[in-house]
Amino acid sequence: MSKKTSVSIVRIEKDINETVRKAVDLVGGLAPRISQGDKVLIKPNFIREEPSHVGTTTNIEVIKATVALVKEAGGVPTVAEASGNQYDTEYIYRTLGLREALGDVTVMDLDQDEIVTIKNDDAIALKEVGVARTVLEADLIIGLPLLKTHMTTSTTIGMKNMMGVLPQREKWKMHMSGLHQALVDLNRIAKPGFVIVDGVVGMEGFGPTIGSPVEMNLILAGEDVVAVDTVGSYVMGFQPQEVKHLELAGEQGLGIHDLNEIEILGEELESVVRAFKRSFGSKVIEVWAANQYRLGTFLLNRFNYDIRGFLKSVSDIYVTKPQLTKNLCDICGLCVETCPTGAVTIDSYPRFDYTRCTKCLRCVQHCPVKALRPSRKPATILKLFSA
Ligand code: SF4
Ligand code: SF4
């Protein structure tokens, strides 16, 4: 009988660093997977500039813990990402304070990297795609995804997180090629050799950027991205067969997609399941997403149009701005201090001048008591369609 692949699930009892270590140790640690001087690419999820406590981006403490483990194993870590299409990776790093948090660790914007075109005649959907050179040259890729719902792929965890190794102009090929199969093809080119899931705060409903946060306080780890995603999806209340790209990945031998073939270490699986609200009408959204990109390509070719600007204007439908929950606010004034545009004043409670607010969400990130959160107006409407 073949040996089962292992996935660990550890509940955060004290601090995140300790929990990451425990989850990684349970599945054998990083030391056997890293040789002295290996280039280790750490791929978080920085799709946009929102802080981790709203469930959008990887918690910086998880990144720091991973960097420390890589260094201890003798590897040379590089943290790298190319954000969602309508966002600016450097701006996200700045807003979230990533470089300051990581000190001397190299942090790369993969949109600025050299792009290497990979041709793969054996691929079913993604026959040709440009990938950042740093990704291709890594000895090991460690993915640091979150537990999020997704409007087209049901869940987005480790496999989907690898879309961030593609520069912006290549990402829409994924949608236009048929996203589910394209994800399998992409993960053959850039497959994480290890995955640590930041399950501190996940996202339910209209993920991956405008859903609602779900406090899970978990860390998952494993070396088979398909198995990790299968377990992660189950934890979110999704049966393995509901996530099309995982099903295809299992059928095509990319990894293990059968829960019976996965050894769960740490917490008992059923004890951590929390049924996430689903996004609505994924088929409709998938068609819309593919055509949004087709329209973008047409505009680029026909009018030399600014694609990022186009996508941003589409995504600005989901206007995000800071919103106060008064009964949580202790009027500390930190939001006033951290706002770069002077958009916040205190008049018994913080008040926001939205004509000055650039929606950078720094105030949300710095509020010590989570009294501020991003409000997403259309998301409220879309939530009506979330199951
Ligand atoms: S930072 Fe948070 S707690 Fe402090 S005043 Fe602003 S909203 Fe209130
Ligand atoms: S109020 Fe200031 S800190 Fe908050 S999102 Fe707006 S510009 Fe950024």
Image: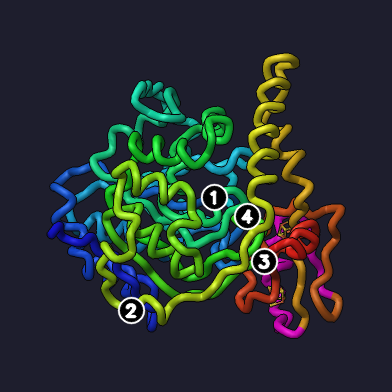
Of label 4 and label 2, which has the lower sequence position?
4
Distance between the Cα atoms at labels 1 and 4? 13 Å
Distance between the Cα atoms at labels 3 and 1? 15 Å
Q: Identify the residue under disc 2.
A: 267
Q: Identify the residue under disc 1.
A: 153
Q: How is the image coloured?
A: rainbow
Dot 1 amino acid type: Thr
Q: Quadrant of residue 191?
A: top left
In front: label 1 or label 2 = 1
Of label 1 and label 4, which has the lower sequence position?
1
On the image, the x and y values in percent for residue 1 come to 12, 60
Distance between the Cα atoms at labels 4 and 2? 28 Å
Distance between the Cα atoms at labels 1 and 2? 26 Å
Q: Which disc, if any, is residue 387?
A: 3
Distance between the Cα atoms at labels 2 and 3? 27 Å
Dot 4 amino acid type: Thr
Determine the residue positioned at 60% across, 65% down: 204
> Quick check: is the Cβ at mark 1 less than 8 Å away from ligand 2?
no
Task: Evaluate whether residue 218 shows in this view.
Answer: yes
User: In the rendered structure, which segment of residues is drawn in magenta?
Assistant: 327-346
Dot 3 amino acid type: Ala
Q: Identify the residue under disc 4.
A: 209
Q: Secondary structure at mark 2?
A: loop
Give above or below for 45 relative to 38.
below
Task: Evaluate whether residue 41 shows in this view.
Answer: no
Q: Nearer the viewer, residue 65 or 385?
A: 385
Q: Are marks 1 and 4 in contact (CB under 8 Å)?
A: no
Q: Nearer the viewer, residue 178 or 37?
A: 178
